[in-house]
Amino acid sequence: MAPSAGLPAANAAAGQAVAQRKGQATGQSCIDCHGADGNAPIDPSYPKIGGQYADYLAHALVGYRDGSRQHVLMNPQAADLSDQEIADVAAWFASRPSQLRDLTTLP
């Protein structure tokens, strides 16, 4: 199934390799900043992305890549990602355990 971001069908297993690969512009990988499963960011201002909707992650990465969404680290990190890599890494992080909370899960 293709993500709603207009990207190709995703391969979550391939996305794990993308998440671990160091970006040329930053020397960082996705997991360096967001944690091995996307749930242990190195800075409290960075989002937990494990278990997030794949479509949301894909749209965010496309936005960082094309500049319509701005972040000093994410723009260069996403700049060289192909559509397939974005679909794959979004699917992989979406498949991780979630620590995300919404108003229905607050104490």
Image (cartoon, rainbow, N blue to C red):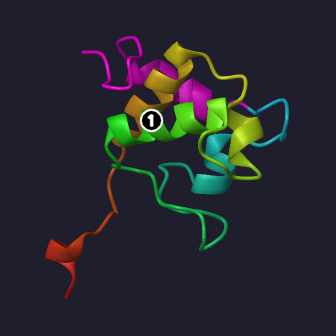
Q: Is residue 28 left or right of residue 69?
A: right
The residue nearer to you, when weighing 61 against 70, is 70
Q: Amino acid at mark 1?
A: His
Q: Which residue is mark 1?
A: 59
**Residue at image point 77% right, 52% down:** 72
Identity of the residue drawn at 47% across and 49% down: 37
Q: Is residue 6 left or right of residue 30?
A: left
Q: Quadrant of residue 9?
A: top left
From this viewpoint, is residue 52 visible?
A: yes
The answer to whether 103 appears left or right of 38 in the picture is left
Figure quadrant of residue 63: top right
User: Residue 34 location in percent, x, y?
Assistant: 58, 54
Residue 95 in view (yes/no): no
Q: Is residue 11 above or below residue 107?
A: above
Q: In the rendered image of this protein, does residue 88 appear above or below residue 99? A: above
- Left or right of 37 in this view: 19: right
Give above or below for 99 relative to 8.
below
Image quadrant where one finds the C terminus: bottom left
Q: Where does residue 94 sit, x and y in percent of width and height? A: 35, 40
Residue found at the very far front of the displayed protein: 68
How many C-alpha atoms fall within 10 Å of the one at disc 1: few (<14), some, or many (≥20)? many
Image location of residue 35, percent across then percent down: 57, 54
Whether residue 7 appears in magenta in the rendering, the answer is yes
Q: Quadrant of residue 103?
A: bottom left
**Residue extent of the magenta highlight:** 1-21
Residue furthest out toward the left:
104
Q: Position of residue 47 (x, y in %)?
A: 51, 61
